[in-house]
Image (spheres, rainbow, N blue to C red):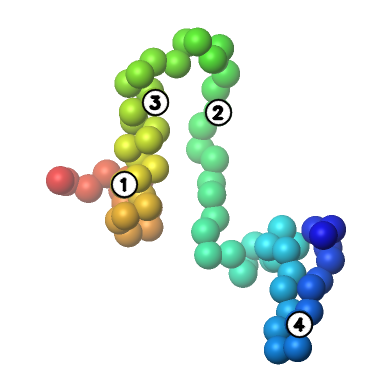
Amino acid sequence: MDKDEIYCAPNFCWRSPVTMSEWMSRITVEITNVHVEQLQEITIDDVMIEIYAEYWNKYNPKNSWKSNPWV
């Protein structure tokens, strides 16, 4: 199915989320920092921080990792 294609069944239509307007999105990601490093330079600590932050945000309120709450 092409990204602009619309699939319609008798009681609903489905359109790829890629074509949605930004105001319709539930989640908006803002990139705040970019840097380059070689793959083998990543440390176990870096990996654990990224994984932990991902799970924290998944199970806690929006932007809770960014707000840095007392825990």
What residue is shown at x 70% (from left), y 89% (from top)?
A: 11
> At which x and y percent is residue 56?
31, 47
Query: Who is closer to the viewer here, 23 or 15?
Result: 15
Distance from disc 2 to disc 3, alpha carbons, whole Å, reads 16 Å
Distance from disc 4 to disc 3, alpha carbons, whole Å, reads 43 Å
Kindly identify which residue carries mark 4.
9
What residue is shown at x 81% (from left), y 71% (from top)?
A: 6
**Image marks 1 and 4: residues in contact by CB distance under 8 Å:** no
Q: Residues within 10 Å of mark 3 (few under 14, many from 20)?
A: few
Q: Amino acid at mark 2?
A: Val
**Image marks 1 and 2: residues in contact by CB distance under 8 Å:** no
Q: Amino acid at mark 3?
A: Val
Q: Does 2 appear above or below 31?
A: below
Kindly identify which residue carries mark 2.
34
Dot placed on the residue nearer the N-terminal end, 4 or 2: 4
Q: Dot 3: what SS?
A: helix
Query: Who is closer to the viewer here, 50 or 35?
Result: 50
Q: Residues within 10 Å of mark 2 (few under 14, many from 20)?
A: few
> At which x and y percent is residue 34?
55, 28
Kindly identify which residue carries mark 1.
56
Distance from disc 1 to disc 4, alpha carbons, whole Å, reads 38 Å
Q: Dot 4: what SS?
A: loop
Kindly identify which residue carries mark 3.
47
